[in-house]
Image: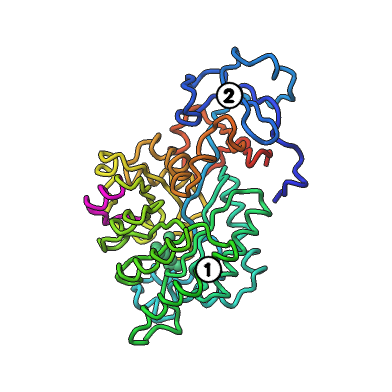
Amino acid sequence: MTSDATSLSSADGLWTGLRLAPGAAPAFTLGADANAVIVVQQGRIHWIGDAAALPAAYAGLARHDGGGALVTAGLIDCHTHLVYGGQRANEFAMRLAGASYEEVTKAGGGIVSSVRATREASEDELFASAAPRLEALLAEGVCAIEIKSGYGLALAHERKQLRVARRLGEAYGVTVRTTFLGAHALPPEYAGRPNGSSEYTDLVCREMMPTLAAEGLIDAVDVFCERIAFSLEETERVFKAAQALGLPVKLHAEQLSDMGGSELAARFGALSCDHIEHLPQAGIEAMRAAGTVAVLLPGAYYTLRDTHLPPIEALRAAGVPMAVSTDHNPGTSPALSLLLMVNMACTLFRLTVPEALAGVTVHAARALGLQDTHGVIAVGLPANFVLWNVREAAELAYWFGGRPVRTVVRQGWIR
Ligand code: DI6
Ligand code: FE
């Protein structure tokens, strides 16, 4: 882990001998074999172009030899539940032995077991357990990440999660966008009450969200809208509370069934609808009209052995931007590789390589409201880019496993 105060060197200078991956720097259409140059100054992109056109003023800068590496914008993991206590490998083993989700839940498993472990953990313990998970993602070139709450389900514990998310961003020099997901599951103390879900939704809207927003801990608000979680009516109550606080929304939508959540989210101008295996055409149209990003989560689809594919062709035809993310969480997607998600998005969901790479860069940025500062290599933006030891961009989706990263430049520093 390096903090900016102790990094060995800044990325300032002349990065030479580069090949820009398609889409990496939209302002340029340099051929994949062009000898591209990036100039970084004070941690920001100052110039990009063909070496032959480099302005003389930059010729004397410190040089970083790219050695012919392929370059993409820094990767963005736009949907994670990275901060939580404990882990649930035992559930994984139980399910392999044939236990149903109900049996796992009866044995104390499921989200509630992560809630219990998160509540028992201190803020420092949560930081310590999340740090190596973040390091694994950063090692693959992630330069921005979304981190949700949703395992505390009570004010003090939701605050703990969101504070850890902020601390991780500061400690590692990575852009972190926090998402309040108090409406992730019904906490044990509300389960079994006749109006427990509605009463808890009130607590989320009237106490937890405004308090944590006032403490500067919330960048966006999310809900798990599903038969086994929160209803459409409860989701709308949470969205209205977020809107009143000026907070953007996103939604775990249509993961297991068509709840109509995507149309509701689009009505609130949601940044993204996520999972969307059961997304209907009406939801697609509403998302297109609202500019809402479709976030695909192949890790959860794979772990749950789902067979209901998201409507990729219809999303593509409608021109809805598609992002790809790990959905890192201890239950349905304990994924620590965004590149593996790129491979799964192609292999399982049939995205093209350019679509999958856009899904972890420019579209992922839009899903976090970061489209003006992240997701592409462009003059004026913070220097977030990755040099890869591959000949062609398709290799970033083709290989799974391995370490194709040559150099990560994150927030203007070599990591
Ligand atoms: N959808 C999921 O797949 C995860 N949360 C959600 O909203 C499950 C989270 C867990 O099992 O811990
Ligand atoms: Fe999720």
Instruction: Determine which residue is flagged by label 2.
Output: 48
Q: Residue furthest bottom?
A: 193
Amino acid beneath label 2 = Ile
The x, y position of residue 41, in whole percent, is 69, 30
Q: How is the image coloured?
A: rainbow
Among the two numbered marks 2 and 1 on one chain, the one whose residue lies closer to the N terminus: 2
Q: Going by the image, does 266 lie left or right of 280?
A: right
Amino acid beneath label 1 = Gln
* Along the viewing direction, whichever of 288 and 243 lies nearer the viewer: 243
Q: Residues within 10 Å of mark 2 (few under 14, many from 20)?
A: many
Q: Residue furthest left?
A: 281
* Residue shown at 77% from the left, 47% from the top: 5
* Residue shown at 44% from the left, 59% from the top: 333
Specify whether residue 285 is painted magenta: yes
Q: Can you say which quadrant of the picture contains the C terminus?
A: top right
Mark 2 → mark 1, Cα distance in angstroms: 44 Å
Which numbered circle lies on residue 87?
1
The x, y position of residue 99, in whole percent, is 36, 74
Proximity of marks 2 and 1: CB atoms separated by less than 8 Å: no
Q: Does label 2 point to a residue whose CB lies under 8 Å from ligand 2?
A: no
Q: Secondary structure at mark 1?
A: loop
Q: Going by the image, does 25 lie left or right of 261?
A: right
The x, y position of residue 153, in whole percent, is 49, 74
Q: Secondary structure at mark 2?
A: strand
Find ligand 1 in the image and state its quadrant.
bottom left
Q: Which residues are magenta?
A: 275-288
Residue 156 visible (yes or no): yes
